[in-house]
Image (cartoon, rainbow, N blue to C red):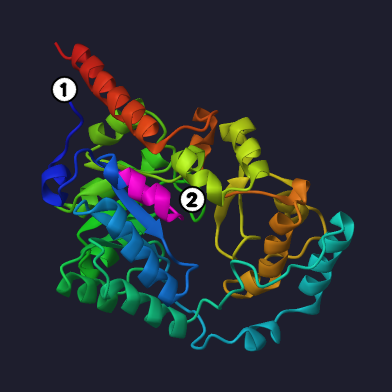
């Protein structure tokens, strides 16, 4: 029986070259247990939470490898001071956010939101990095920014290093930092994404990366997409949106979000900076439309936008404000219409890729 394989499988000790990014422990562990490479998105977690959650994933996966992803953008403030950030937010932006609160009658949040629990800052990043370096995690992924000092520190601990990039211009920077794997993330991707489409981006990055293995992210939803990724010279794929439809993830998903994701097509997502200040692809809702409306102020840079909207985003889900509830998602959202276990999603991806690769052989004469 044929199986999906690439050299990364032997290099990393995995059964199939499918990397899965998720924000919850159960989903990440399930991806690794299913033979893929689960990667935990820990950017919005306190250092002590990262320590405990990575330990829990290790307990769940045993000797199977897994990774963690941190967003490490340059230019963040030095200290974890919400007061200092709030003092610089323009009144126009505060008034606009209040207008959304008034229009949808959003009660106050009972506590800080996910984006206001702490400030993205050098102080927090240093402690998060230390927690990762001192863990048993096998792979350290850098979602935005791959500082050379961080990459080298991870490699010194025996951790595989990975950088997600959205432009061929970023390849050399990743090589200079010393990363082991590059993820070419196309415009189709959910959450933080760049301006170049996956099919245009990947061959350029594969060529520029030389011997470095490349994974494909952005619009990957089926076995045919995986086959196409391998045909473009990549050694595997990186998926995030798919796992939003996993039964393991539902404990962390508002039911309204699940419904909106199931109903969404590939054309129902939009890139906005209103979430964090960085480009962020999400399902189009009243939230994104409010920030696109005539007269709306331009979103602030990270972490100012985080602080401006963080508590409100938490209140929206806490108080079930249906029109404003939304989720990050890539254009691959159009391929998923039901909630299933991670193992079932993995099985379909693998078998679909094998079938597609076999079918491609028929084009050779």
Going by the image, does 281 lie left or right of 100? left
User: Is residue 5 shown above or below 160?
Assistant: above
Instruction: Please say whether residue 30 is one of the residues in the magenta stretch.
Output: yes
Residue 124 is left or right of residue 204, and the answer is right
Q: Can you say which quadrant of the picture contains the N terminus?
A: top left
State the residue position of label 1.
2
The x and y percentages for residue 255 are 64, 43
Residue 85 is left or right of residue 34, and the answer is right
Sequence order check: which comes first, mark 1 or mark 2? 1
Task: Classify residue 17 as left or right of residue 165.
Answer: left
Query: Residue at horizontal 35%, vertical 57%?
Result: 164
Asked whether 124 or 202 is in front, the reply is: 124
Q: Position of residue 129 (x, y in %)?
A: 34, 76
Vertical placement of 273 versus 83: above or below? above
Which one is in front in this view, the residue at disc 1 or the one at disc 2? 1
Residue 60 on the magenta segment: no
The residues bearing labels 1 and 2 have C-alpha atoms spaced at a distance of: 36 Å
Q: Bin the neighbour count of mark 2 within 10 Å (Cα to Cα): few under 14, some 14-19, many 20 and up.
A: some
- Please tell me whether mark 1 sits on a helix, a strand or a loop: loop
Q: Quadrant of residue 337?
A: top right
User: In which quadrant will I find the C terminus?
Assistant: top left
In the rendered picture of this protein, how many numbered marks are placed on residues?
Answer: 2
Q: Residue at x 46, y 43 (%)?
A: 248
Callout 2: SS: loop
Q: Which residues are magenta?
A: 19-31
The part of the image, by quadrant, that contains residue 139 is bottom left
Percent from the top left, x then y, of residue 24? Answer: 45, 54
Residue 14, compared with residue 88, is above or below; it is: above
Residues 158 and 282: in front is: 158
Residue 112: quarter of image = bottom right
Residue identifier under label 2: 195
């Amino acid at each position: 029986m044929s199986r999906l394989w690439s050299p990364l499988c032997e290099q990393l000790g995995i059964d199939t070259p499918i990397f899965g990014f998720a924000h919850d422990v159960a989903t990440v562990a399930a991806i690794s247990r299913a033979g893929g490479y689960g990667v935990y998105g820990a950017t919005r977690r306190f250092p002590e939470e990262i320590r405990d959650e990575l330990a829990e994933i290790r307990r769940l996966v045993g000797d199977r490898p897994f990774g963690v992803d941190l967003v490490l953008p340059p230019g963040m403030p030095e200290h974890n001071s919400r007061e200092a950030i709030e003092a610089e937010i323009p009144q126009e932006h505060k008034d606009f956010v209040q207008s959304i609160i008034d229009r949808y009658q959003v009660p106050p949040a009972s506590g800080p939101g996910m984006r206001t629990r702490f400030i993205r800052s050098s102080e927090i990043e240093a402690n998060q990095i230390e927690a990762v370096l001192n863990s048993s995690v096998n792979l350290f992924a850098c979602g935005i920014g791959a500082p050379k000092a961080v990459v080298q520190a991870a490699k010194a601990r025996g951790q595989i290093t990975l950088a997600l990039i959205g432009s061929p211009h970023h390849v050399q920077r990743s090589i200079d930092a010393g990363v082991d794997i590059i993820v070419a993330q196309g415009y189709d991707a959910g959450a933080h994404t760049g301006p170049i489409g996956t099919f245009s981006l990947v061959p350029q990055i594969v060529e520029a990366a030389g011997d470095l293995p490349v994974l494909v992210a952005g619009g990957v939803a089926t076995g045919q997409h995986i086959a196409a990724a391998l045909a473009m010279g990549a050694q595997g794929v990186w998926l995030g949106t798919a796992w939003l439809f996993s039964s393991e993830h539902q404990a962390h998903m508002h039911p309204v979000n699940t419904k909106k994701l199931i109903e969404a097509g590939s054309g129902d997502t939009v890139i906005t900076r209103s979430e964090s200040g960085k480009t962020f692809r999400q399902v189009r809702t009243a939230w994104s439309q409010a920030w696109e409306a005539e007269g709306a102020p331009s979103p602030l840079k990270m972490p100012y936008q985080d602080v401006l909207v963080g508590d409100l985003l938490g209140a929206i889900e806490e108080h079930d404000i249906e029109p404003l509830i939304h989720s990050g998602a890539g254009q691959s959202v159009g391929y998923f219409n039901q909630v299933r276990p991670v193992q079932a999603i993995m099985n379909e991806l693998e078998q679909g890729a094998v079938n597609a690769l076999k079918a491609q052989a028929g084009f050779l004469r």
